Image (cartoon, rainbow, N blue to C red):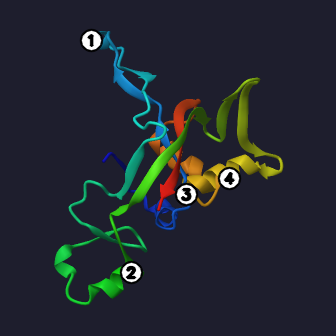
Amino acid sequence: MKQINFNDKRILKSLLDKTKTVFIEKAFKYVQHPDFEEGKGFEEVDKPCKYKKGEIYEVVWKKYSKHKYFKKSNGEAIPLENFGLGMSEILDDNLFNKNLGKVKITKIEKIEIDINTLWFDTKVGKLPFSKDMYGWNEPCRRISKSIGDKSPEDMFKRIEEMANLSEARPFYLISKEWIK
């Protein structure tokens, strides 16, 4: 089964309690420019979304870790040699298995994000979700919560770690529903 990998402990709680229903994926990549030899460097090109609407994926914490169990408090691995008899009671309260469950992709939207704004394409043009004189607008607060961040500020900070947001960059906003 295809997997969706997460490893950012800032969103761990929302993964464990299954309130994370949206995630963001870059819709661009950098490739070597054809004239690289002449000092052209790299250029940004579109990247197709690797997820498909309607498909089911397994959600995994730290996919490439050799460890199977992690601490709920901080997402750090627990080596298997630390497990002994009677660990099942401790597991439920303090640890979790790296396989967090299955999700179905329900919607994929291509949006643009810059330093403080989510730009959505609509029939009448680009619609900004951002901060105004009254604070962050409701859609921006709702999106940041569904992504697993505590606030829009946290969301933009985390996204900026993925890409330079000094100018608008394309991203996929991918909605999912947890399967019981």
Residue nearest the observer in this picture, 142 or 159:
142
User: Residue 125: x and y, percent?
Assistant: 73, 24
Query: Of marks 4 and 3, which one's residue comes earlier in the chain?
Result: 4
Q: Secondary structure at mark 1?
A: helix
Q: Which mark is residue 92?
A: 2
The local crowd at label 3, few if under 14, some if 14 to 19, many if 20 or more residues have their Cα within 10 Å, is many
Marks 1/2: CA–CA distance: 57 Å
Amino acid type, callout 1: Glu
The local crowd at label 2, few if under 14, some if 14 to 19, many if 20 or more residues have their Cα within 10 Å, is few
- In the picture of the structure, the residue carrying the numbered disc 4 is 142
Residue at 83% x, 47% y is 133
Q: Which mark is residue 156?
A: none
Q: Secondary structure at mark 2?
A: helix
Residue at 21% x, 81% y is 83
- In the picture of the structure, the residue carrying the numbered disc 3 is 148
User: Residue 115: x and y, percent?
Assistant: 61, 39
Question: 140 left or right of 33?
Answer: right
Marks 1/4: CA–CA distance: 46 Å
Marks 3/2: CA–CA distance: 22 Å
Marks 1/3: CA–CA distance: 43 Å
User: Residue 129: x and y, percent?
Assistant: 71, 40
The mark closer to the camera, 1 or 3, is: 3
Q: Which mark is residue 37?
A: 1
Amino acid type, callout 3: Gly
Q: Secondary structure at mark 4?
A: helix
User: Residue 93: x and y, percent?
Assistant: 41, 82
